[in-house]
Amino acid sequence: MEAYQIRDIINMTVDATVERMTIEAGGLTARISLKQAYKTYGKTAVEFWIRTGLIKTQKMGDNNSKVTLDRIELRLLSKTDNRALYFNSK
């Protein structure tokens, strides 16, 4: 493994840890709406991640309830240029 790969893994871990701590402290919700994910990460990217099974959607209720996604997984996906590295880390 190259030094830049190790650095990227450490940076992703730190980002995920900070986000998780913020969620646990009540500063953020653990899940975000599909609409917000589109705004933050781009509709094409989010749809690709869902279609390829890299992230799962969850509907919070019946019929008109909104679709949500895991905030931390979205962040990790957005920061991972090498999707195989992310997929193998699961």
Image (spheres, rainbow, N blue to C red):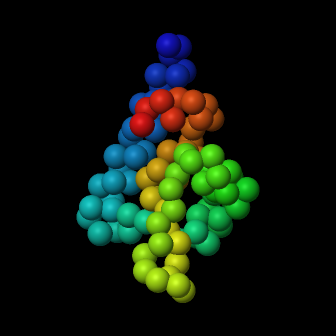
Regarding residue 75, the answer to whether it shows in the image is no
Q: Quadrant of residue 24?
A: bottom left
Q: Is 5 positioned to the left or the right of 89 in the image?
A: right
Residue at the far right in the pictured view: 44
Residue plotted at (55% across, 46% down): 54
Q: Which image quarter is the C terminus in?
A: top left
Regarding residue 50, the answer to whether it shows in the image is yes
Residue at the far left in the pictured view: 25
- Image: 89 above or below 41: above
- Image: 63 above or below 47: below
Q: Is 79 positioned to the left or the right of 22 in the image?
A: right
Q: Quadrant of residue 47?
A: bottom right
- Image: 34 above or below 45: below
Residue at the far front in the pictured view: 63
Give residue 71's position: percent from left, percent from top.
Answer: 46, 59
Residue at the far bottom in the pictured view: 64
Give residue 30's position: percent from left, percent from top.
Answer: 38, 64
Give residue 74's position: percent from left, percent from top.
Answer: 52, 53
Q: Is 25 positioned to the left or the right of 55 in the image?
A: left
Callout count: 0
Residue plotted at (61% across, 72% down): 35
Q: Is 65 positioned to the left or the right of 52 in the image?
A: left
Q: Quadrant of residue 64?
A: bottom right
Residue plotted at (52% across, 78% down): 66
Residue plotted at (70% across, 61% down): 43
- Image: 70 above or below 89: below
Nearer to us in this view, 45 or 65: 65
